[in-house]
Image (tube, coloured by chain):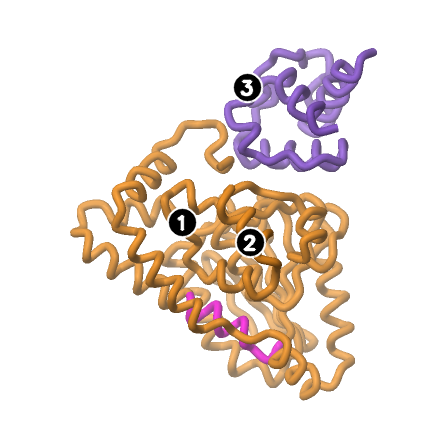
């Protein structure tokens, strides 16, 4: 598995576990606000969990307009 | 009065520790009602401090400690008002909240902010008046005011300048980005990072430790190490009020209030 795919997979697993959504229902191009049914405060919660999980700092302005898992993974991968 | 249960906050004095709990949905936004109850708390604070050694501020809400000023109230309150009348209203609000913040900041009690989740804007400013900041690992910190065409108005910049290096202050203020508890500890904003949901428990343990020390010594130490930046605080109110008249502020507030954006809290 490439690093990109591994990062994406870890994000999907973490999101599914945190927001109690079956993992098989999540795909890379899903709008995570819609699929996870989360609001902005929960999005911040997800951001914080991802930062801890990957041990990276993600300035939130870099995520403005990002709503799919694939792009999110690429932003994180760029900081690993 | 050893306890109070209000609509936005409550407090109780027990075993020498005053616990002030914030509980206004959705995330303890500070509007006129919260201000009134904070003023009530500040007026009681000076009378109960002889029976207490510590003060803990915390939120009962899982969403966070406090998301800052109630921007909806600010926006709707200013609608239909003449510019000068709106600025007078804002200045009055700021004068009142600064008085509360200064009372907590300068209190002889050792104060602890037990933080979780969103600690943004006015919420971070409220935390900054405390002597010790204990954050759970999911806490997040931000000064998003610049996106509204404003600066923080509840004393944030002077207190950040007092406590942190200027580079961090500029990063927080000028980028409007948020950062997590680990980063906050790295830059010296918080003193302890604890497990998720554990900040109040750890704050209580810390408050119990503080009770072992001679009060006069603790008060002298606090006074020596933590001056109140009164001049900068007054200047901050002036700058805030000057900026408040800009068209960009009304546009920024309108955008926030009417936003259906899924990320309104992301600057």
Residue at image mark 2:
B169
Q: Please report, as a chain letter, where disc 1 is located.
A: B
Q: Nearer the viewer, residue B260 or B141?
A: B141
Q: Is residue A57 above or below residue A37?
A: below
Q: Is residue B253 magenta?
A: no
Quarter of the figure with the C terminus of chain A? top right
For label 1, the residue is B70
- Residue B109: quadrant of the picture: bottom right
- Which numbered disc, 2 or 3, marks the residue closer to the eye? 2
Chain letter of the orange region: B
Q: What stretch is highlighted in magenta?
A: B98-109
Chain corresponding to purple in the figure: A
Mark 2 and mark 3 on one chain: no
Q: Residue B128: image x %, image y %?
A: 56, 61
Residue A48, position in %: x, y? 66, 37
> Which part of the image, by quadrant, shows the N terminus of chain A?
top right
Q: Mark 2 lies on which chain?
A: B
Q: Residues within 10 Å of mark 3 (few under 14, many from 20)?
A: few
Q: Which residue is drawn at 69% across and 85% down?
A: B215
Instruction: Tell me if residue B105 comes above or below residue B50 in the rendering.
Output: above
Real-space Cα separation, disc 1 to disc 3, in angstroms: 27 Å
Label 2 with label 3: CB-CB less than 8 Å: no
Q: Nearer the viewer, mark 1 or mark 2?
A: 2
């Amino acid at each position: 598995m490439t690093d990109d795919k591994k990062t994406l997979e870890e994000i999907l697993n973490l999101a599914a576990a945190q927001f109690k959504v079956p993992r098989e229902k999540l795909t890379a191009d899903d709008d995570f606000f819609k699929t996870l049914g989360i609001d902005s405060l929960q999005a911040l919660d997800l951001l914080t969990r991802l930062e801890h999980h990957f041990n990276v700092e993600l300035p939130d302005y870099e995520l403005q307009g990002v709503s799919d898992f694939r792009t999110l993974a690429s932003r994180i991968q760029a900081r690993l | 009065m050893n306890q109070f249960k209000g609509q936005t906050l409550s407090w109780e004095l027990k075993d020498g520790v005053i616990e002030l709990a914030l509980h206004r949905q959705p995330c303890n936004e500070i509007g006129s009602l919260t201000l009134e109850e904070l003023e009530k708390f500040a007026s009681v604070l000076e009378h109960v401090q002889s029976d207490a050694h510590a003060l803990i501020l915390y939120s009962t809400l899982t969403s966070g400690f406090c998301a800052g000023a109630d921007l909806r109230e600010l926006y709707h309150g200013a609608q239909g008002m003449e510019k000068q009348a709106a600025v007078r209203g804002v200045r009055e609000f700021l004068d009142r909240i600064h008085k509360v913040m200064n009372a907590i900041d300068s209190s002889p009690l050792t104060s602890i902010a037990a933080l979780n989740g969103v600690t943004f804007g006015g919420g971070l400013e409220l935390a900054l008046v405390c002597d010790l900041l204990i954050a759970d690992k999911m806490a997040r910190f931000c000064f998003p005011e610049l996106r509204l065409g404003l600066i923080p108005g509840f004393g944030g910049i002077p207190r950040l300048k007092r406590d942190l290096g200027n580079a961090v202050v500029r990063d927080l203020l000028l980028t409007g980005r948020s950062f997590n508890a680990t980063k906050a500890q790295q830059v010296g904003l918080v003193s302890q990072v604890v497990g998720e949901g554990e900040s109040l428990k750890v704050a209580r343990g810390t408050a119990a430790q503080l009770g072992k020390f001679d009060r006069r010594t603790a008060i002298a130490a606090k006074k020596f190490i933590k001056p109140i930046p009164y001049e900068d605080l007054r200047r901050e109110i002036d700058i805030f009020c000057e900026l408040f008249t800009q068209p960009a502020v009304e546009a920024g507030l309108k955008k926030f209030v009417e936003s259906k954006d899924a990320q309104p809290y992301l600057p």
